[in-house]
Amino acid sequence: MPKLDVDLEQQALPTGHYGFSAQRIEDLGATEYTLTTIVVDESGSVAGFKPDMERCIQEVVKACQLSPRADNLMIRLVAFNSSLNEVHGFKLLSAINLDDYRDVLKTGGMTALYDAAENGVLATSVYGKQLSAQDLNVNGIVIVITDGDDNASKSTKNIVKTALAGAVKDENLESLISILVGVNVQDPKLSDYLNSFKADAGFTQYVELGNASAKTLAKLADFVSKSISAQSQALGTGGPSKSLAF
């Protein structure tokens, strides 16, 4: 089950054993929200750049907190290795303490990439449906960050595809942007694999970092925060934001 959070309400998903948590709807004050889900790899191979990855997450959230759209954003953070770990569910930015992202990744284990991607999409769609039912205007963005291919999931590539297609077809969200990020991709076979996963599952965009230095992860933080901002600004237009160049 997700990590318990006294401020958030635990919820189940229609498929899978791992649910999600989210801000209680009665505690929300705005009329529109962009739901942001960040899904980040914490398998054993991430250990070499763990501090820089944590700073990357911290900088993304910090930039969102400083955005003019801060009151209309909620963020959920999921880490994954052989299993999933919801670090926190969908939270208002005002409820997030940046210091909580220090030493937040517990590296080790294998890579349940498909399980994590499916959960990120389904949770965004299900919570979006609940908000829409209360006449709130909602769109979403899911960012999945990995440094390897799947070797531990119960889900499949096709199940991720079904989740992404369903999130759009069911119209629980005005629009959904999905970004797959390959980090420290130095093996051409891994690059080919992740490009294929993007295409086969139906992600909106794939971006690739050839290494995982402090500089490249800072660039990733800037790209992700700007992508979140663009999707939030697109809310109410009836469609998604345009993909940004990395």
Image: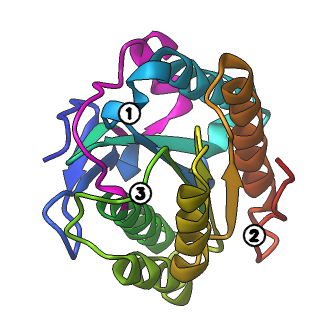
Q: Examine the structure image and report whether residue 91 is included in the region drawn in magenta.
A: yes
Lower sequence index among marks 3 and 2: 3
| x, y percent for residue 160 | 40, 75
Specify start and end residues of the magenta stretch as a single range: 88-113
Count residues near mark 1 (Cα–Cα under 10 Å), then give few for <14, some for 14-19, many for 20+: some
- Residue at disc 3, secondary structure: loop
Q: Amino acid at mark 2?
A: Pro
Q: Residues under labels 1 and 2: Cα distance? A: 34 Å
- Residue 134 vs 100, above or below: the answer is below
Q: Is residue 226 visible?
A: yes
Q: Quadrant of residue 45?
A: top left
> Mark 2 — residue?
240
Q: Are marks 3 and 2 in contact (CB under 8 Å)?
A: no
Lower sequence index among marks 1 and 2: 1
| x, y percent for residue 211 | 65, 33
> Mark 3 — residue?
149
Image disc number at residue 45:
1
* Residue found 49% across the figure and 78% down from its top: 167
Foreground tag (3 vs 2): 3
Apparent side of residue 155 relative to residue 189 in the rendered image (left or right): left
* Residue found 62% across the figure and 67% down from its top: 195
Image disc number at residue 205:
none
| x, y percent for residue 180 | 58, 57
